[in-house]
Image (cartoon, helix red, strand yellow):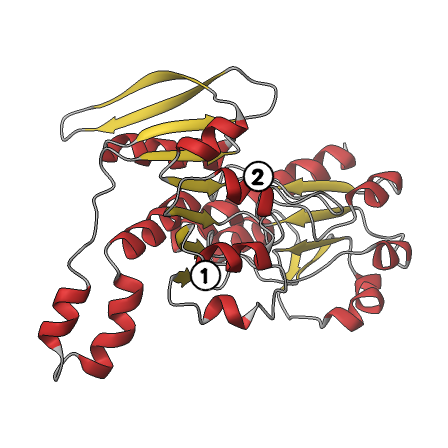
Amino acid sequence: MIRILANDGIDAIGKKMLTEAGFEVVTTKVPQADLAKALADYDAIFVRSATKVTKEIIEANPNLRLIGRAGVGLDNIDVEFAKYKGIKIVNTPDASSQSVAELVYAHLFAMVRFLHHANRQMPVDGVDKFAELKKAYSEGIELRGKTIGIIGFGRIGQATARIALGLGMKVMPFKLHASEVKIEFDFIHSSNDSTIMIKMNTVPFEELLSQSDFITLHVPFPKGAAPVISKKEFALMKHGVGIVNTSRGGVIVEQDLLDALNSEKVAYAGLDVFEGEPKPNKSLLEHPNVSSTPHIGASTKEAQERIGIELAQKVIDFFLHQEK
């Protein structure tokens, strides 16, 4: 029997699919320090972002045949060494796009209408200082008509663009090695559904930085890669720009972001990921113009169900193919 350690868990439907296909799935969490030894009893391991599958762990477990990432990024897996050892790597790039994109706008709406401030202050001062708070938070803006620059135009970037277009925003996509991008736009009606394809021209990186009212990042961040946004890029941006990062910690240099927030070059930032996870920079968390979440971009019931199903099907296909 194929044994799988789902060390960061798996949705119940995905687990059921694997069990019914004859796999044993164990969801008991193994601490990172004990993982190399514990994996000796397994053929495969599933991880999300918490567990790291390092070269040392792979080297200690020649029995491993598959590593599954319940999500998109593979930065917590030594992919090159795993492939060198003949281990199959699978991930779920399709499943979480909508959930991550919706979190981008949760941050954007919170920031432009000062919800991240009001939710902190209303419980403290809402009774005694209602009028003052109303005045303080009455200068919000609409997203409609504003320009959003989307750095990285894969599945999540495209999902982000679809929402932006629905809101009436101007979209400026940036994608390496592409002058034109396409997105499918689904319309759901009471009687029938329809889909249209929208073509968009990409823009140079510097143009995106200088003309966007809001910037959101959706790029992979391989180990050793240079940050996408640092002091140089902040200098090119509009004064009062808003930034959202739901991709990876390290894509933005956090000290440079703090400096830009303090100078008001950046009016607000929505952050779901941090350089020091699981111990993020406290100065960012406490900054009054930061809306923060604890790396929950893909953490919706719908996304986790889709992730479990996609991962389970890929694993079943892999092992059944091997056994033929």
Residue type at the position of mark 1: Asn
Extreme residue toward the left, this view: 131
Percent position of residue 100, x then y: 43, 47
Q: Which numbered dot is residue 16?
A: none
The image shows a total of numbered marks equal to 2
Earlier along the polypeptide chain: callout 2 or callout 1?
Answer: 2
> On the picture, is 220 further left or further right than 107?
right
Classify 10 Å Cα crowding around label 1: few (below 14), some (14-19), many (20 and above).
Answer: some
Percent position of residue 254, x then y: 58, 57
Q: Dividing the picture into quarters, in which one does residue 172 lie?
A: top left
* Residue 299 visible in the picture: no
Q: Which numbered dot is residue 262?
A: 1
Q: Dividing the picture into quarters, in which one does residue 133 lie?
A: bottom left
Q: Which residue is pictured at 72% across the width and 59% down the height?
A: 52
Tell me how far mark 2 sits from mark 1, CA to CA: 26 Å
Q: Quick one: 112 or 240, which is closer to the camera?
A: 240
**Does dot 2 land on a helix, a strand or a loop?**
loop
